[in-house]
C-alpha cells in the first residue's frame, strides 16, 4: 500500500448506496456517501453535524 493513499473502510452499503470513510495520510478523516450518481464528502466535523441532523429524522420514520 502506498503511504500517500488513504486507508478506506466501508461503513455500510445497500444495492444503491454506500457510506465509507477514509483515513487520509495527513491525519484527517473524511466520510463519503455515494447515493446513486451523487457523492457527498464530509470532513469529520461536518459528518458529526450531518449525523445530528439525520438521527431524529431516521428515528421518526421507524
Image (cartoon, grey):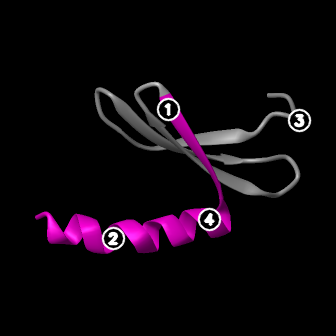
Q: x%, y% of residue 43?
A: 68, 58
Q: First in sequence: mark 1 or mark 2?
A: 1
- Compare marks 4 and 3 and give the one earlier in the sequence: 3
Vertical order, 55 against 19 (above or below)? below
Magenta region, residue range: 38-62
Please name the residue that numbered disc 2 is placed on: 55
Label 4 CA crowd tier, 10 Å (few <14, some 14–19, many 20+)? few
Residue at 28% from the left image edge and 74% from the top image edge: 56
Does residue 60 appear left or right of residue 53 in this picture?
left
CA–CA distance between discs 2 and 3?
34 Å
Return the residue at label 3. 4
Between 49 and 15, the one nearer to me in the picture: 49
Of tags 4 and 3, the one toward the viewer is 4
Q: CA distance from mark 2 to mark 4?
A: 14 Å
Position of residue 58 in the picture relative to residue 47 (left or right): left
Question: Which SS type dominates the magenta stretch?
Answer: helix
Front residue of this view, candidates 42 and 11:
42
Q: Which residue is mark 1?
A: 38
CA–CA distance in space, label 4 to label 3: 23 Å
Check contact, mark 4 vs mark 3: CB within 8 A: no
Label 2 or label 3, whichever comes before in sequence order: 3
Residue 48: quarter of image: bottom right
Q: What separation in Å lies between label 1 and label 2 (alpha carbons)?
A: 21 Å
Amino acid at each position: 500500500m502506498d503511504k500517500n493513499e488513504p486507508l478506506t473502510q466501508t461503513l455500510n452499503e445497500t444495492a444503491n448506496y454506500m457510506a465509507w470513510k477514509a483515513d487520509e495520510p495527513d491525519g484527517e478523516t473524511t466520510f463519503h456517501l455515494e447515493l446513486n450518481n451523487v457523492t457527498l464528502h464530509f470532513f469529520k466535523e461536518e459528518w458529526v453535524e450531518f449525523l445530528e441532523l439525520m438521527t431524529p429524522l431516521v428515528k421518526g420514520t421507524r
